[in-house]
Image (tube, grey):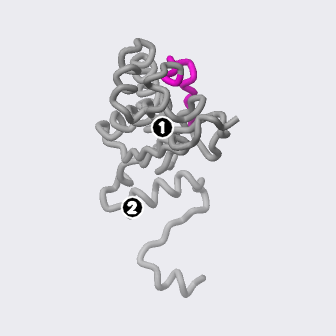
Amino acid sequence: MARIRADADQIIDTSDQTVHTLRSHLVERFSPDRKGGPMRVQLLSFGHKFGNPGDLELLFDVRHLPNPHFISELKPLSGHDKRVVKYLRSQPEVEETLSRFSDLLDYLLPLYKREGKSYVSVGIGCTGGRHRSVFVANALGRRLRSAGFDAHVVHRDVRKSNRHR
């Protein structure tokens, strides 16, 4: 160890540091922008009937929102389609839900970052993963990107058959 210490440019005494304080110290010392960059947030839409994804920090269930699946002309579409977006945007509880989810993320994400997390995964689930969760994940992704987060949206089940189960 003495040889390594002699060759080192910097020495950090980690004796009394937790993994979180060490990470913070390393980011502060070695990160080019001294802040660690924007937090990466993955928004994963999914259908509960296909199973909940593992390894999430947060899971939002949007099955309380009106379901386009039960409107015949919207059923074959997805949360990407303009008609589904228009329908969901016209529902007061959808806008209220988006606002509350956004407020919660605005509160929680800086706290996760303060604790040393550089990546947070948020699941957004509806029944089949085609309409509501896709729409909400896309909307939250846009809001997070405009707030400076590195937000990526993944739609796990959007292409799966409606006939499963």
Residue 67, labelled with which disc? none
Q: Earlier in the sequence, mark 1 or mark 2?
A: 2
Viewer-nearest residue: 110 or 54: 54
- At x 54%, y 65%, the residue is 13
Q: Secondary structure at mark 1?
A: helix
Tell me if label 1 and label 2 are in contact, CB under 8 Å: no
To which residue does mark 2 refer? 29
Give, as a three-letter code, the residue at label 2.
Answer: Arg
Given residues 26 and 1, the one toward you in this image is 26
The N terminus lies in quadrant: bottom right
Residue 138, by quadrant, is top left
Q: Residue at the top extreme?
A: 92
Q: Which residue does the image show at 47% across and 41% down from the upper left?
A: 43
Outermost residue on the bottom side: it is 3
Tell whether 123 sits left or right of 74. Answer: right
Q: Which residue is mark 1?
A: 111
Image location of residue 44, percent across then percent down: 51, 42
Give the quadrant of the C terminus: top right
Q: Amino acid at mark 1?
A: Leu
Which range of residues does the magenta coloring cover? 58-69
Measure the alpha-carbon separation of dots 1 and 2.
20 Å
